[in-house]
Amino acid sequence: MPNTKGQPILLRMRLAFFFGPVFALFPFIASCSTTNGATPLGGSDDASVAPTGPSGLPCNVEKVFVEHCQQCHSAAPKFGAPMPLVTHADLIAAAKSDPTKSVYDLVSARIKDDAKPMPQPPNARLDASQVSAVDAWVAAGAPESSAGCTTTTTPSADGGTTPPSVTPGTPGPLSCTPNLAIIPAGAWTMPKTTKDEYVCFGVDVTVPTKKQVIAFAPRIVNSTIVHHVLLYQTPLAVDPAHTPCGAGGGSGWRMMYAWAPGGPNMTLPPEAGFPLEGTTHYAVQVHYSNIGGLDGQTDTSGFDACTTDELRANDADVLAFGTVNINIPARGTLDRTCDFKVPAAVGTVNLVAAFPHMHKLGTAIETTQLPADGSAPVSLGRQAQWDFNNQLWFGIGTTAKPGDTIRTRCAWANPTDTAVRFGEKTEDEMCYSFTMYYPKISVGAWNWQAPAFASSCRNTQ
Ligand code: HEC
C-alpha cells in the first residue's frame, strides 16, 4: 500500500488547473501554444474575506487590496507577507523593510516594480486603472476616507456571508480524489527568532504493483508561515523528520512539482502518469517565513496526489535542460547559452510544463526549442528577471523531435569574493529547466540530468 498517512483533505471550490493537450480548459494557455510563448501557470483571482469594520480606505483603493493583496497581506499576514494591507492605519504605518518610508510609498513603488512586482508572480499584475487608483490616492497624501465600503467582495455561493472554504491563495480541488498524502509524520515548529528557514522531510511510497501518479496539489496547513513548497523525487531515501536543509536540494534531486501562493495544481494530460513501481523516494522542501517573529507556529504542510492503477498509455517523467558547466567568477558575471540536440535514440517527446530553476545569484533564465525543420522557435519558459523567491511553472504543450535544438540561456551576477560553481547546495548555482514530458525516455545510459550534462555551451556576452 502507498504510504498514506492521514486522510486526504477535502478540497472544495474553484477549478483545478489542467494542462497538457487539453489546453482549451485554460484559455490563455491555449492561445499561447499558437503564439510560441510559454505562459506562467497560475494567477488565480482569489477572493479574500473582507474586513469587518470600515477600513478607512477609499472604496476603489480598498477594492484593489481586497481583490489582489489580502490573500497574503491579510490582517494576520500570510505566506511570508511582512504586513497587513487592510486598514488606513496599516497603510500609513512605517514600512517593515525601511521604517523611513510609509507602507503606502512602498505599495506605490512595488505595484510598478517589474523586477519585484506586487502582487508577486504567478498572481496577475494590477491593470493600469488599478495602478492609477492607488497612485492618485498616494499622491493626495493617502487621506483617510469615511466611505465605509467594507463588504466589497466575498464571492461565495451564498452571496458573501460565508468565508471562502479554501484558504485564499491556495488552488481549489483536484478533479480526481487525492489518495496519496506526501506529508510529514510530525509537525515542524518554527523558532520565534528565525525569519526564514528551508526545511526538508522524506516520504517513501511503496507499491506492490505498478501505479501512476496523475495529479499533485499542495496541502497547505499553516499559511501564516508557509512561503512555498517544493516536491522532489530523490535517488535515496530522505530523513522523514523535518530537517533544516538549505535553499538547494540534495544530490540528484529532481523537481516534480512546486507550489507558491496563487499557483495551480498539477494535473497530467489524460494519456500520461508518473510511474510508481517498488519504492519511490520523495522529498518535500518547505520554505518557512516568520518575518513577524511569531511564537509557537507549527506546520504539517506537504502534498496530496492522485494515483491510479488503471495505467495510462504513457509514463511521464521530468528531465533537466540547461547546464552543469557553471563557473561564475568572484565579483563578476556569467552569461551562458547551452544547446542540447535531441538524439535520434530519444525519439519524439511531448513537453508538458517547465520549471526554470537557478539559485540566488541567477539574474535570467530562458529555454527555447529550435525545431530542426526550420519552423518558428518555441518558448519553453522564460524569466527575464530571475527572482529566487518567485519560481514559476510554465505550461508548454509542444513536441520535441530528434534533431531539434533545445537552447537554455542562464545569467548570473556574483557579488561575493569566491567563484561559484554548479551544485545543489544553497551557495552553489544551477541552470536547470526542469521539464515534464512523456513518454518517459529509457534508452541505455539516459538519466534525467543527461540533457544538462550533454549540452554544449558558449558565453553569451
Ligand atoms: C501571493 C502573496 C502576495 C500577494 C498577493 C501580494 N503580496 Fe506583497 N508581499 C508578499 C511577500 C511574501 C512579501 C515579502 C517579500 C518581498 O518583499 O518581496 C511582500 C512584500 C510587499 C511589500 C514590501 C513591504 C516592505 O516592507 O518591504 C509591499 C509594499 C507589498 N508587498 C505590497 C503588495 C500589494 C500592494 C499587493 C497587492 C496589489 C501585494 N503586495 C500582493 C506577498 C504577497
Image (tube, rainbow, N blue to C red):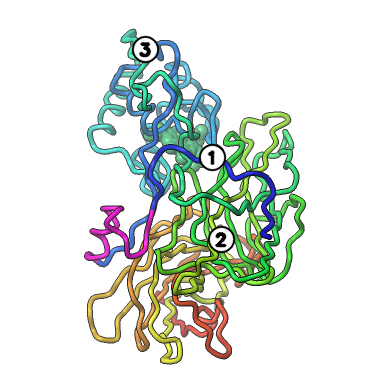
Gap between marks 1 and 3 measured at Cα: 41 Å
* Label 2: which secondary element: loop
434 within the magenta span:
no
Residue, disc 1: 10
Q: What label sits on residue 62 in the rendered view?
A: none
How far across and down, in percent of the image, does residue 23 sit? 30, 59
Within-10-Å neighbours for mark 1: few <14, some 14–19, many 20+: few
27 within the magenta span:
yes
Q: Nearer the viewer, residue 184 or 158?
A: 158
- In the rendered image of this protein, does residue 354 appear above or below residue 225? below
Identify the residue at image location x=47%, y=52%.
176
Gap between marks 1 and 2 measured at Cα: 35 Å
Identify the residue at image location x=48%, y=55%.
391
- Left or right: residue 169 versus residue 160 is right
Can residue 333 be seen by looking at this rendering?
A: no
Quadrant for the N terminus, please: bottom right
Label 1–label 3 contact, CB within 8 A: no
- In the rendered image of this protein, does residue 352 appear above or below residue 109? below
Within-10-Å neighbours for mark 2: few <14, some 14–19, many 20+: many
Q: Amino acid at mark 2?
A: His
Residue, disc 3: 144
Residue, disc 2: 359
Identify the residue at image location x=46%, y=34%.
168
Identify the residue at image location x=66%, y=66%.
207
* Label 3: which secondary element: loop
Q: Which residues are magenta?
A: 18-35
Q: Amino acid at mark 3?
A: Glu
Q: Amino acid at mark 1?
A: Leu
Question: Which of pointers 2 and 3 lies earlier in the amino acid sequence?
Answer: 3
Q: Nearer the viewer, residue 84 or 259?
A: 259
- In the rendered image of this protein, does residue 234 appear above or below residue 19? below
- Left or right: residue 182 versus residue 103 is right
